[in-house]
Image: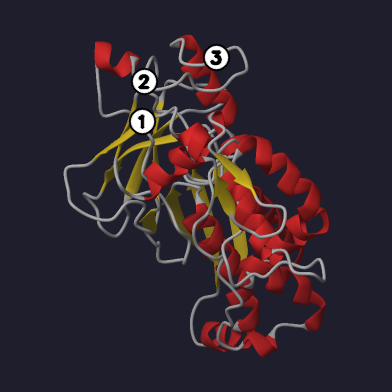
Amino acid sequence: MLTIDHGISGLGPRTVLLVAYLAITVVAERVSLKKTQKTGEQFNIRLTIFEQNPEERACCGEAFQPDCQATLNSTVPGPIKIRNQDNIPTEFADFVESVTDLGAAVAKAIGPNAAKRIEELKKMNLVAACMLKNALLPSGKLDTSVPYATRNEIGKMLQNLFAETKQFVKEHVPELEIVDRCSTKVLRADLTDRNRPALIVQGSLDRPKDERRHVFNFVHFNNGIPLHSQLSGAEANMCYSDLPNRDLMRQYLAERNLLDDQGFLKPSNTESSIGLLGLGLSAGDYFSILINFTKIFSLSNDHEVLVADKTEAAKYPGLLTFISPTDGDVFVLHITGSGFGRPARP
C-alpha cells in the first residue's frame, strides 16, 4: 500500500485544526475514498509534525501559551459543519462537536466554575474578569456570542483537542498516521526536487545537535510568529518581552523598583513611567494586566463593567505611553483565518 508523506513545520493552532478536520473529513468521505481507490493504488496518509517547543507548550502557538493570561478579544469559532458530515456515524458525535464547535468546548470547560474563575481573574487580569462576568448568564451558562476567554484557556482546549484527535485516529481512522516530534526545529527546506521536498531539522532525544534530512511528498509551513524583543544591547535589558503573565510582569517591575510595599505601581509623578510598543491587540494584552498593578479600576458588583476611581487615577499622570510607527486606533483587533483574535505582527 502506498503511503503519502506530509511533513509539517509547526504544531500550533493551525496544525491542530488541520489534523482534526482531516480526521473527521476522512470518515465523512470514506465511501468516496474507497471508490477512488478501486480505480487506482490504495494509499494511506502519514503526517509528520515538527515542533520546536517541548510537548507541554505544543499546540498553543505564541498566542495561546499555557502561562499567557491575556484575554481573547474575539469569540471562539463554531459551530461549523463540514461537507457530508451526516455520513459520520453518530457514535463519533462528541468528537465531531469538539472539532467543529470550539466555542462549545471552551464553554464546557469554563462554565461550571465560572464564578470561581471570575474571582481568580480579579487578582490576575481585571479586564478578563469583567469579560467573563459579562458572558455569564443567569442560568449559569456562558453566552458564547461575546468574548470571555483568556488565551491560556484556548491553549488548553487546543492541547486537549490534539490529544483527542490522535486517539481518535489511532482507534477509528486507519487511513491516517500522525507522528509528532516536539523539541525539534525545522532549520530550512530543500526544494531541489519539487516532487520530493525535504525538511532539514535539528533536535532529538538522542542526538539533539545533529541536522537530519526528512523527505516527503508534500511539505506544509504552519510556522507562527515568535515573540521576541526588537531591542538589543542595554536597551533589551530594560525591555519586557515575555508573555502577558502577572507573575512574570510583577518580577520585572519589582526588579526595577517600580512597586511599593503592597505590590502596586508607585505613583508615576515620582517613580513609574512605562512605554508600550504598539497600538494593536498585543498592547491591549499587556495593558489589561499592567493596570492590575494599580487601584484605578474595580469590577462593579451590580453591573458587568469596570469602575474608575478618579482619585487613584490622579496618582498616575502619564503612566503609560503607547508608541507606534503607524497611525490608528488603540487595540485594533486582528483576526486569523480560523476566526481567532491574535497579536499583531511585531
Q: What residue type is labelled 2?
A: Asn
Q: Where is residue 263 in the image (x, y as percent from the top left)?
A: 59, 19
Reading the chain from its start, which is encountered first: label 1 or label 2? 2
The answer to whether mark 1 and mark 2 are in CB contact below 8 A is yes
Label 2 belongs to which residue?
269
Q: Position of residue 341 (x, y in %)?
A: 45, 58
Quarter the C terminus occupies: top left
In this rendering, would 24 be left or right of 46? right
Above or below residue 92? Residue 126 is above
Marks 3 and 2, Cα distance to the nearest angstrom?
14 Å
Reading the chain from its start, which is encountered first: label 3 or label 2? 3
Secondary structure state at the residue bearing disc 1: loop
Label 3 belongs to which residue?
260
In the foreground, 21 or 299: 299
Secondary structure state at the residue bearing disc 2: loop
Q: What residue type is labelled 1?
A: Pro
Q: What residue type is labelled 3?
A: Asp
Above or below residue 338? Residue 238 is above
- Residue at the image position 73 percent from the left and 69 percent from the top: 95
Label 1 belongs to which residue?
317
Residue 297 appears in the figure: yes
Q: How is the image coloured?
A: secondary structure
- Residue at the image position 18 percent from the left and 52 percent from the top: 327
In this rendering, would 211 be left or right of 72? left
Within 10 Å of disc 3 (Cα), the crowding (few <14, some 14-19, many 20+) is: few
Quarter the N terminus occupies: bottom right
- Camera-nearest label, 3 or 1: 1
Above or below residue 177? Residue 128 is above
